[in-house]
Image (cartoon, rainbow, N blue to C red):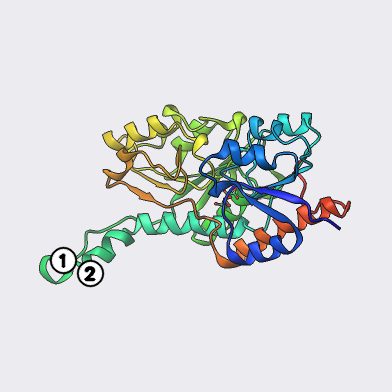
Amino acid sequence: MEKPHILQIGPYPDWDMERLEERFVMHRYFEADDKASFLSGCAEQIRGIATRGELGADKALIEALPNLEIISVYGVGYDAVDLKAAEAAGVRVTNTPDVLTKDVADLGVAMMLAASRGLVGAEDWVRSGNWKNKGLFPLKTRVFGKKVGILGLGRIGYEVARRCAAFDMDIHYNDLEPRDFAGDWHFVADPAALAKEVDFLFVTLTGGPATKGIVGRDVIEALGPDGMLINISRASNIDEAALLDALESKALGFACLDVFDGEPNVDERFLALDNVLLQPHHASGTIETRKAMGKLVYDNLAAQFDRKPLPTPVL
Ligand code: 8YV
């Protein structure tokens, strides 16, 4: 049987490439300097796209591939895939839910703890000799007993909330409606009211047009000069210009960010701030989780060409 041809939008670890190359002909779009001529050379053959959460597949790409059957996303978020264009072209879309949930929650909570206790500055305090020469490290802020807000109580939000509850924090959340499984966690009907209520606000929403800019100036200012914002979802959920203004003026106390508009190009204004903790979009970046994500990307592609049910379909 002839191997199906797959357009690969971004790099994967070697262990994924070995498995993919055994079963498919992989076209490394991300390595091409001249993307247009690369595409016109293989467009007719391509039957699948293998992409990443943050890279997706846009309308122009989907429409340029007349024999496309499936887009397999390495990530739970598929907001960068043009679902309308995929649906119109009869193209299936899959993602990698569940396998990354706990790692993403872990990174969010790790950032909250690290930032509250000043771990990055404290490490430098030891290495620079400040401990010996200047004395004690400045006192930091506790998390236990504080109020935490979860904006989006989906799978990842739930795991963040569970972890925060284990740190003896008081859990508040906002979602479309109160959730049965939330027990004694407090539902707050509006994102700005949630921000006003809490000390720490986690953004754990899915990305996409419905939630774009939901954390606007009003929410950021409601969180206030002593508040901390933690984003492990999509940059598009936050009005980044408003966030930068608030961090610079100290209208917002602190932000822990794993995602950025235009990443990996991070707005230089962030780099000048001392009230941010910046991470390179690696909340799902453990070996164990990335192996599970890679296997799901492969399993979905293989199921499509074996004409079997897709393990994790979105569309
Ligand atoms: C990225 C993510 O996909 O799951 C998601 O939606 O954003 C991440 O897991 C990861 O950087 C791999 O591209």
Q: Residue at x 74, y 50 (%)?
A: 5
* Amino acid type assigned to the residue bearing label 2 in the image: Val
Disc number at residue 239? none
Assign the C terminus to one quadrant of the image: top right
Q: Residue at x 41, y 37 (%)?
A: 223
Is residue 34 visible in this depiction of the protein?
Answer: yes
On screen, residue 128 above or below 206: below
Residue 50 in percent (x, y) is at 67, 49
Residue 134 in percent (x, y) is at 12, 65
Query: Pointer 1: residues within 10 angstroms few (<14), some, or many (20+)?
Result: some
Q: Secondary structure at mark 2?
A: helix
Residue 156 in percent (x, y) is at 61, 51
On screen, residue 165 above or below 193: below
Q: Are marks 1 and 2 in contact (CB under 8 Å)?
A: yes
Q: Secondary structure at mark 1?
A: helix
Frontmost residue, 61 versus 214: 61
Is residue 144 visible in this depiction of the protein?
Answer: no
Residue that mark 2 sits on: 126
Residue lying at the far right of the rendered structure: 307
Frontmost residue, 27 versus 251: 27
Residue 208 appears left or right of 280: right
Residue 169 appears left or right of 154: left
| Occupied quadrant, residue 222 | top left
- 3D distance between C-alphas at marks 1 and 2: 6 Å
Frontmost residue, 310 versus 128: 310
| Occupied quadrant, residue 218 | top left
* Amino acid type assigned to the residue bearing label 1 in the image: Asn
Residue that mark 1 sits on: 130
Assign the N terminus to one quadrant of the image: bottom right
